[in-house]
Image (cartoon, rainbow, N blue to C red):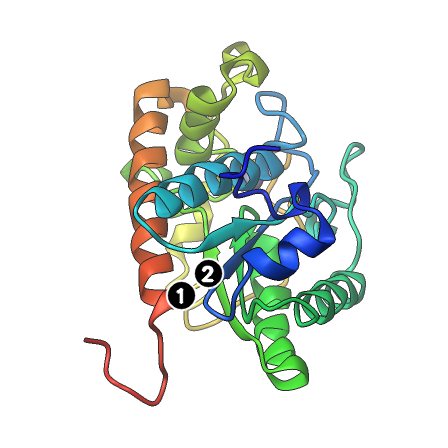
């Protein structure tokens, strides 16, 4: 074990007790193992959360922040892809119970700050519940940050699963696992005609399963994805994450942000 490791689970118990302090920020990468079409691996969200958390934690540590990384959570809430073989999911209740256990365990250490670094949209709602529960139950300072995978303009705001951004990022992170011969546009063209009903940010949300759209479980257009875009998205995210960890390190909801 290198003394400079930022991998919390590589420490011994006694070492953890002296190396973590109330100022330490502990990052839990949260992924998923779920259907991502024929062009991306099942572990896409896990790989993104895992790899981006390594880069973000290392960069934050290099800039002087006391940041640590927990081993990633692989199996999470992917019930929207339950229909697709290869999706390995636990329900919202199970995920919440797991997060409660991780928070309870973190509260036994000197650290007081837990950050979820999330790679899967389906986890956003349960993570938001866990933020408050762990704050209330254990007095932890809790935060959630998602790996941003933007939509391309030609995706009409619907590039949310296996689309241009996510595929580009994977072509940068793990090109060996991407299958360009299966790139195909998968946009439910009529969906953007609705003024009120839509995904996150719309006035009216709707319950959906990923096979509701007639697009084979993908929502997006990977046909113009490329590794250079992925490299840029990764660098953008690391910068955003380091800034976020810096702000988290001094965050006081009752005080100013200066
Ligand atoms: Zn994904």
Q: Nearer the viewer, mark 2 or mark 1?
A: 1
State the image quarter where residue 139 is shown: bottom right
Residue 86 image position (x, y, % from top left): 78, 32
State the image quarter where residue 201 is shown: bottom left
Can you identify the residue that label 2 sits on? 198
Q: Is residue 82 above or below residue 94?
A: above
Would you say the residues marked 2 and 1 are in contact, meaning their CB atoms lie under 8 Å apart? yes
Seen at 37% across and 54% down, the residue is: 65
Q: Is residue 208 visible?
A: no
Seen at 76% across and 66% down, the residue is: 101
Q: Is residue 245 above or below residue 250?
A: above
Question: In front: 141, or 233?
Answer: 141
Seen at 80% across and 53% down, the residue is: 90
Question: Which type of secondary structure does the marked residue at label 2 adopt?
Answer: loop
Seen at 52% across and 36% down, the residue is: 48
Q: Report whether 179 appears left or right of 155.
A: right
Q: Is residue 131 above or below residue 33?
A: below
Q: Residue lying furthest bottom in this view?
A: 254
Figure quadrant of the N terminus: top right
| Dot 2 crowding, Cα within 10 Å, few <14, some 14–19, many 20+ | some
Can you identify the residue that label 1 sits on? 201
Residue 135 image position (x, y, % from top left): 58, 80
Q: Is residue 144 visible?
A: yes
Figure quadrant of the C terminus: bottom left
């Amino acid at each position: 074990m290198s003394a400079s490791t930022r991998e919390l689970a590589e420490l011994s118990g006694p070492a953890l007790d002296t190396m973590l302090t109330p100022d330490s920020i502990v990052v839990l990468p949260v992924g998923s193992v779920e259907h991502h079409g024929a062009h991306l691996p099942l572990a896409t969200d896990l790989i993104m959360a895992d790899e981006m958390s390594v880069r973000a934690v290392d960069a934050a540590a290099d800039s002087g922040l006391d940041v640590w990384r927990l081993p990633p959570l692989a199996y999470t809430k992917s019930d929207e892809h339950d229909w697709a073989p290869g999706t390995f999911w636990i329900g919202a209740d199970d995920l919440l119970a797991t997060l409660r256990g991780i928070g309870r365990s973190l509260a036994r250490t000197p650290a007081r700050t837990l950050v979820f670094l999330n790679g899967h949209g389906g986890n956003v709602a349960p993570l938001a519940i866990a933020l408050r529960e762990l704050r209330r139950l254990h007095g932890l300072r809790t935060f959630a940050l998602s790996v941003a995978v933007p939509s391309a303009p030609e995706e009409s705001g619907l590039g949310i699963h296996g689309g241009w951004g996510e595929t580009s990022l994977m072509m940068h992170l793990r090109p060996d696992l991407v299958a360009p011969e299966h790139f195909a546009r998968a946009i439910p063209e009529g969906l953007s005609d609705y003024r009120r009903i839509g995904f996150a940010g719309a006035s009216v949300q709707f319950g959906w399963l990923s096979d509701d759209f007639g697009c084979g479980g993908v929502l997006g257009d990977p046909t113009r994805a490329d590794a250079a875009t992925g490299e840029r998205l990764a660098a953008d995210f690391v910068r955003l994450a380091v800034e976020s960890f810096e702000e988290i390190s001094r965050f006081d909801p009752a005080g100013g942000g200066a």
